[in-house]
Image: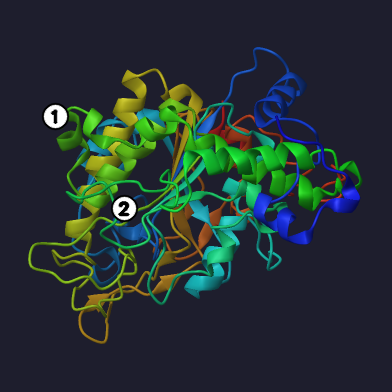
Amino acid sequence: MSQSIQPSTVARRRLIQAGGIGALGLSLPQLLRADERARGAGKREFSCIFIHQFGGLSQLDSWDMKPAAPEEIRGPYRPCSTATPGFRICELMPRLARLSEQYAVVRTLTHKQSEHKRANSMYLAGQENPAADAPSFGAMVAKLRPSLASIPGHVWLQKFGGGAAPPDHTYLTGGNLGMAYAPMLIGERHDDNPASPDFRVRAFDAPDEVSPARLLRRRGALDDLQRLSRMATPEFATQDLYQRRSFELLGSSTAREAFEMDREPERLRDRYGRHPLGQNLLLARRLIEAGARLVNVVAWTGLAEGEKFVSVETWDMHGNADVGIFENGWNGLPFALPRTDQAVAALLEDLGDRGLLDSTLVVLVGEFGRTPVIRKGAKRIGRDHWPQCYSAMLAGARVRGGAVYGESDKQAGYVKSHPVTLEDFCATLFAAMDIEPGSGISPDGFSVRASLGHPIAAVLQ
């Protein structure tokens, strides 16, 4: 049994070794059960798989085609009919066309920032002008709806990379909410994903020099230091929650098993696609099924045969990376869009088959769209950055399937009706997960709100 410790005898070094204090005097399960009771017994819990089309997908070549526009605007692809009367999307997405009654498309997202890093920071926070330490949507969900399972509640699959990547603190920390709400990152490198034959999650491995007995002693130190109630600040409380999660995950067989992809049938893995996006989405489904609350997936679709790695910015299709936007390579639509169609359609079908789609929000969006006019890039044909009007797809949870919201002009360059700000889009995501957008996220519970936007009622049910 651990000896009691008096406040006067606690050295700074031991505080650091213990990793924080149990300022609240509660275990993680107790904290989460209290949160569950506060939300009301029996209330449905929603989760989210957020797919980031890093680089910015062309709206003209996907969700908002303009076949009557001149060739230098419309591009080479034809629209195909969907299961929703009057709604057509790119011919490179035939599987998603058949599933259109399961998702909604917002065609009029708009903001003014055309630089990747800043635009990514903005849409991650759901704000036009976020503070430098603003928490991401995922961090806010992790705070407002923590997972009750013995598994990481907030996960990020495939790190942003390349010159366009936003700062790590915008999405790999909890921002001003604290590290307790940061995601577990899986995929530091482009080849560190479940499509690689040697993929293995090492996050649950204790350091070689730390034995199980030593971990128990450290946990005991945390329990002893709970008595220091005079240190019960919000910072200590979030640090304590973070450390307790870490200890519990190290001993969680549920968490380990959720990341073991070889438990999935080969046929299902083939159905998602044996590429990074396909396998990461299958892993995301496994994590949601095991109890994760929010899984972010970067839509890196991999490399064509013989290609060398350049960046995970799949959708930044200027034509400047030796691949034109209409060429069949890693940075081209005929390579990336069919893989995305395959993987996202498989995800929607798989979630539906397992009874999870009604409780899982699926988001597919990038930081902006692409220019209406096709131009010759430094090396190939491409489209440049365009935040004035672009599209997003939402499915599952409280989303109204078959809905198409907003209308762009004849070139899909500007909003014609029903503009959607980043604030309104973020508020819609919260509402789709049955989270009040105006929920307080600051320590006092009211001075800082998750979102000041207004949900789009037309795409919700």
Residue 455 appears in the picture as rendered: no
Q: Could you tell me which residue is drawn at 84 percent across and 42 percent down?
A: 445
1 or 2: tag closer to the N-terminus: 2
Disc 1 or disc 2, which is closer to the eye? Answer: 1
Question: What residue did someone put label 1 on?
Answer: 267
Viewer-proximal residue among 213 and 279: 213
SS at circle 2: loop
SS at circle 1: helix
Outermost residue to the top: 42
447 w.r.t. 344: above or below: below
Give the quarter of the image for residue 314.
Answer: bottom left
Q: For this view, does 307 lie left or right of residue 97?
A: left
Colouring style: rainbow
Question: What residue did someone put label 2 on?
Answer: 62
Viewer-proximal residue among 294 and 433: 294
Q: Count neighbours of disc 1 (C-alpha within 10 A) and say few if under 14, some if 14 to 19, many if 20 or more.
A: few
Q: x and y percent of residue 44 in the render?
A: 59, 19
Q: For this view, does 428 lie left or right of residue 256?
A: right
Give the quarter of the image for residue 70.
Answer: bottom left
Q: For this view, does 69 lie left or right of residue 138?
A: left
Q: Amino acid at mark 2?
A: Ser
Q: x and y percent of residue 436 in the render?
A: 71, 35
Q: x and y percent of residue 61 in the render?
A: 29, 58
Q: x and y percent of residue 83 in the render?
A: 29, 30
Q: Could you tell me which residue is drawn at 72 percent across and 36 percent down?
A: 223
Q: Amino acid at mark 1?
A: Arg
User: Which part of the image, by quadrant, shows the C terminus?
Assistant: top right
43 w.r.t. 396: above or below: above
**CB of mark 1 within 8 Å of CB of mark 2?**
no
